[in-house]
Image (cartoon, rainbow, N blue to C red):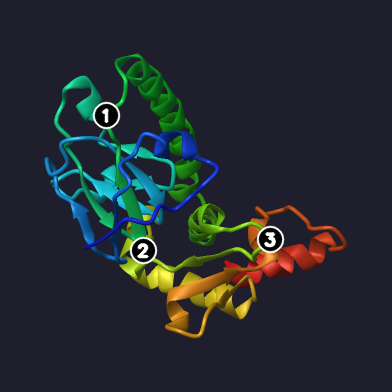
Amino acid sequence: MITISSPVSSARHDDLLAWCSPERERFRRGALVFRAGRFQWPFVVVAGAMRLDLPAGDDSALHLALPGDLLGVEHLIGQPQSTCCRAIVETVIAPLGVVPEGLRQELLIRQLAASHRRAAEQGRLRFGPASERIRALLLMLAQHERMADEPMSCELPRLSDIAALTDTAPETASRVLSSLRRSGLIASGGDAEPQRSVQIGPLMHLRAGEMPAGMTRSRTSAAHARAA
């Protein structure tokens, strides 16, 4: 764990960051962020992504936390935080500061709505072909890390995390990633540890059966078949 003080901005959750402490904590990929009961106050995910598990370690209880998510919200209603959490890519968090009493209810309602949206998004990680589930995970990570006017890219989680989040075996996740690379849907990014970073090709945005401008259905089907 590394504590930093420089804030990380994001238009998607500046409203929450306005109530956060100026201190930031940065965690490397694979680092344990907290065990159940560590945090005594809610915090906001500033950058990166984390997997949340029940202490029993049942992968079926996995939840993915992304930038803008408010975690440890149980403390706002006097309940203990009951999950453990691990960074799946490099992650930055900020503790929520003292929130005026009148704003707490609004934060809870907003977080409830966000949780419903996130649950719907993450349903795509548990159903359908393995290639579609892993594609959806990479897009989720890349969309949150993308800066304006930059190509989409993301840090690649460990195979064990990809497999757990998409309900696949690590061997399957490895085969799918290799297939996505061969088909050009993803490419290694960066000079330092290129296997840890991937750039997202334009066809990754398409679900099965969709076509980009200027591409025939037969060519689209062939691209998806190579990634399957």
Where residue 50 appears, x then y in whole percent? 33, 53
- Vertical placement of 148 versus 219: above or below? above
Badge 2 density bin: few <14, some 14–19, many ≥20, Cα 10 Å: some
Give the amino acid at mark 1. Answer: Val
Name the residue beneath numbered marker 3. Answer: 149
Give the amino acid at mark 3. Answer: Asp
Q: Residue at x 63, y 72 (%)?
A: 226
* Residue 47 found in image quarter: bottom left
Where residue 53 appears, x then y in whole percent? 23, 47
Mark 3 vs 2: CB contact within 8 A: no
Give the amino acid at mark 2. Answer: Glu
Q: Secondary structure at mark 3?
A: loop
Q: Which sits in the foreground, 171 or 106? A: 106
Residue 98 - label: 1
Front position among marks 3 and 2:
3
Q: Residue at x 66, y 65 (%)?
A: 224
Name the residue beneath numbered marker 2. Answer: 90
